[in-house]
Image: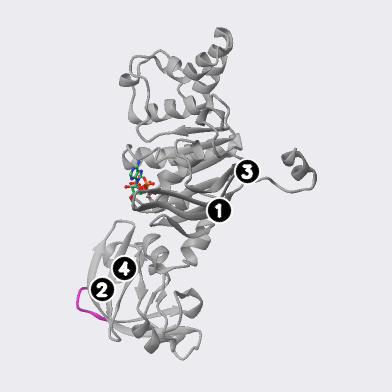
Amino acid sequence: MYILEAIENGFMVAAVQFQGVSRHFGDVRAVDDVSFEIDDGEFFSMLGPSGSGKTTCLRLIAGFEEPAAGSILIHGTNATGLPPYERDVNTVFQDYALFPHMSVMDNITYSLMLKRVAKQERAARGARMLELVKLDDLGRRKPAELSGGQRQRVALARALINEPRVLLLDEPLGALDLKLREQMQVELKALQRSLGITFIYVTHDQEEALSMSDRLAVFNLGRIEQIGSPEDVYEHPATPFVAGFVGISNILPAEVAAGLTGKSRPFSIRPEKVHFGDDEHAGSNDWCSVAGKVRDVQYHGANTRYQIALETGGELTVLRQNLGSVTRNTGLRIGDSIRLSWHREDMQFLGAEI
Ligand code: ATP
């Protein structure tokens, strides 16, 4: 009733809502008074270092854990006390958790068998799922006869066959090598778009979270430091932790900032926003400029990272795309003197003025 009224009144009911949710294990505050909303149909990532509380949040949504405080709403209904099988969510685990003795088709349709769905319908839905995850010809194989990426697809098909409105994915690509992971990222995102269901995705890989998500939440020590679009979080990190965890850490402390910006507040600047040289902008109030010495040069193929020790103290990383051959690039070597400049708009001040 509540949902119908909300839709009639033009409100979208959130797929998942956390209201002051906590889950502690002894002294460990795995999830500590967390509140957020995930929209229906959204690709939402939970990003954070190991032990920051992402998986516990996912398990709370799935119903494998119960909150010690606060409430969780799934599509507007309080899920407290509901067992996992009564929630309109399904989970894909990192280790896939496939049954080794069963064929791919039986793995995928297992939950339909438990629900006593007729054999013919099971086969038809199983075949549709195999097609969806591009495993059409592999239904008779056993999991051991598949590659890592194929096993991952079976786990995905098995979760999707129940047609959940929310799919929970816990580091689903963690076991794959880099190439396959990148390919599966594109496929997962395309699948989510075409199905239009909510994906809640746990990862500690910031590039994965930035490239796939509509929005992401950055976790630290059981709390959320920032929620926003990938652009928001990357361009405007709200805290020093986010500035350091998402992207390359490039933070100058308050005492160095004071000499450069006139404000005694730490700030971050993304490495690709820092320019070599300051001739074009000399005298402009919109630009900051500082002298430094090259301390290190790291070649990364598509780009090169330069560590520049500033004469004001502090150090900045500068990233340059290798558009030409290495010799045609900056030509900078360790020990060279260089001026750096950046637009004031690209600085993100962090914390209060000291
Ligand atoms: P990872 O990326 O390593 O999976 P995470 O961000 O998902 O980490 P959680 O698994 O949610 O983190 O764990 C958060 C904290 O809670 C950690 O300190 C962890 O050791 C602790 N924790 C999680 N589950 C339990 C449990 N069942 N018993 C005791 N402590 C737990």
- Front label number (2 vs 4): 2
Q: Position of residue 214 (x, y in %)?
A: 55, 50
Q: Which residues are magenta?
A: 331-337
Most common secondary structure along the magenta stretch? loop
Secondary structure found at label 2:
loop
Residue placed under numbered mark 2 in the picture = 332
| Residue at (55% x, 16% y) in the render | 115
**Mark earlier in primary sequence (1, 2):** 1
- Residue that label 3 marks: 40
Where residue 331 sits in the image (x, y, percent)?
A: 26, 72
Which type of secondary structure does the marked residue at label 4 adopt? loop
* Mark number displayed over residue 36: 1
- Say what secondary structure mark 3 lies in: loop
Tag in front: 3 or 1: 1
Q: Position of residue 132 (x, y in %)?
A: 52, 26
Q: Reply yes or no: does residue 333 show up in magenta.
A: yes
Residue in front for this viewpoint, 282 or 52 = 52
Residues at marks 1 and 2, CA–CA distance in whole angstroms: 46 Å
Q: Are marks 3 and 1 in contact (CB under 8 Å)?
A: no
The residue that label 4 is drawn on is 329
Q: Amino acid at mark 4?
A: Asn
Please tell me which residue is depicted at 65% across the width and 42% down the height of the picture: 76
Q: Residue furthest left?
A: 335
Q: Please determine whether, in this image, residue 189 is positioned above or below residue 301.
A: above
